[in-house]
Image (cartoon, grey):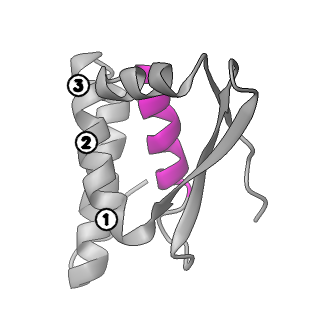
Amino acid sequence: MISLMRIYNAKSEQDFVNRVRGGDITLARIIVDAIIHNLDSTKRHNYIVTVKLEDEEEYYDLTCHSEEFIVTLEKNLKVLVDAEAYEECSQVVEAIKYLKGKKGNSYVLQN
């Protein structure tokens, strides 16, 4: 499977931090999409997005440890709820249930 390169632009490191703290919906969607596409990945660290800091002309790749998928989805679910992106919220809830079920083998993701 080929990883899709995603680029998220920010003016500076502080701008990026402010967007994360402010619950940026675009970033939340990127994170959720990347995790959902890697639910069954056997990798420990999964590529999420490349952050381009325009002022510094720097690029940083963000990854998410597979053991952090649930907590990361839960944090970004709050951003999606605040944005009233309910269809995406339901996908995140299903993904969380699936991941919790994988740990306990009691739930299978429904398409």
Q: Residue at x 34, y 55 (%)?
A: 95
Q: Is residue 45 left or right of residue 82?
A: right
Residue 96 versus residue 74: which sits nearer the camera?
74
Residue position marked by numbered label 2 in the rendering: 75
Q: Is residue 58 magenta?
A: no
Q: Quadrant of residue 108?
A: bottom left
Q: Give x and y (percent) for residue 51.
A: 63, 35
Q: Residue at x 60, y 16 (%)?
A: 11
Label 3: few (<14), some (14–19) or many (≥20) C-alpha neighbours in 10 Å? some
Residue 29 in view in this figure: yes
Q: Earlier in the sequence, mark 1 or mark 3?
A: 3
Q: Earlier in the sequence, mark 2 or mark 3?
A: 2
Q: Residue at x 27, y 37 (%)?
A: 77
Residue position marked by numbered label 1 in the rendering: 98
Three-letter amino acid code at the position of disc 3: Val
The kind of secondary structure the magenta stretch mainly shows is: helix
The Cα atoms of the two marked residues, 1 and 2, are separated by 17 Å
Q: Is residue 104 above or below residue 86?
A: below
Residue 7 versus residue 29: which sits nearer the camera?
7
Q: Residue at x 75, y 65 (%)?
A: 1
Q: Give x and y (percent) for residue 24.
A: 39, 21
Q: Is residue 108 left or right of residue 65?
A: left
**What span is in magenta?**
25-37
Residue position marked by numbered label 3 in the rendering: 81
Tell me the SS state at disc 2: helix
Three-letter amino acid code at the position of disc 2: Lys
Tell me the SS state at disc 1: helix
Q: Quadrant of residue 70?
A: bottom left
